[in-house]
Amino acid sequence: ESGCTPDKKLSVWWFRRGAEGGEPYSMYRLARCYRDGDGTKQDFALSLKWYKAAAATGDKDSMYHVGQHYVSGWGVPIDEEEAREWFQKAADKGDSDAQRAIDMMNHGIFVNFPWPGVR
């Protein structure tokens, strides 16, 4: 144990600084903070913006999370085809969760990721 108390708002500040500097992991973490409202106000539009930015660098986890936004309607209208495209991009990079989401969609199972405060 470090003896330090986590400061989530300060973490968001550092993630934002890294993300704005083009660092993919910071983009991913900042997107997650906005998605979860962790250390900042929940904002699905900003979450999607930063997941897409990280996905553009080739980050498969971010590609998967972009798909989650579209299939669940987090800050955007539900768009299963757009979700499928993002899941496929992630699956092509070896993301097993994305492949599972595609398989479920192929079998007519709606892959909704419910989130508190959404809908």
Image (cartoon, grey):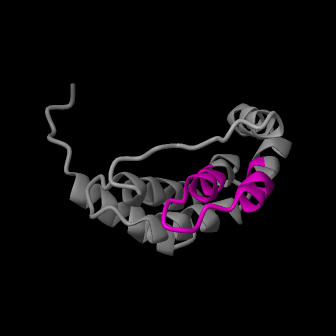
Task: Work out whether 25 lies above or below 23.
Answer: above
Q: Residue at x 80, y 52 (%)?
A: 89
Classify the position of the N terminus by image quarter: top left
Residue lying at the far bottom of the rendered structure: 20
Magenta stretch: dominant secondary structure: helix
In x, y percent, where is residue 28? 53, 55
Compare residues 33 and 119 and report the one nearer the observer: 119
Q: Does the magenta portion include 108? A: no
Compare residues 117 and 55 and report the one nearer the observer: 117
In x, y percent, where is residue 63? 68, 54
Report the number of numbered marks.
Answer: 0
Residue 25, located in which quarter of the rendered image? bottom right
Task: Work out whether 7 lies above or below 17.
Answer: above
Residue lying at the far top of the rendered structure: 1
Residue 66, located in which quarter of the rendered image? bottom right
Q: Decide if residue 31 is on the left or right side of residue 63.
A: left
Q: Decide if residue 56 is on the left or right side of residue 114.
A: right
Q: Residue at x 60, y 50 (%)?
A: 68
Q: Which residues are magenta?
A: 65-87
Task: Work out whether 42 lies above or below 1.
Answer: below
Classify the position of the C terminus by image quarter: bottom left
Q: Residue at x 75, y 48 (%)?
A: 87
Residue lying at the far front of the rendered structure: 108
In x, y percent, where is residue 69? 57, 57
Q: Residue at x 72, y 40 (%)?
A: 98
Q: Decide if residue 81 is on the left or right side of residue 13.
A: right
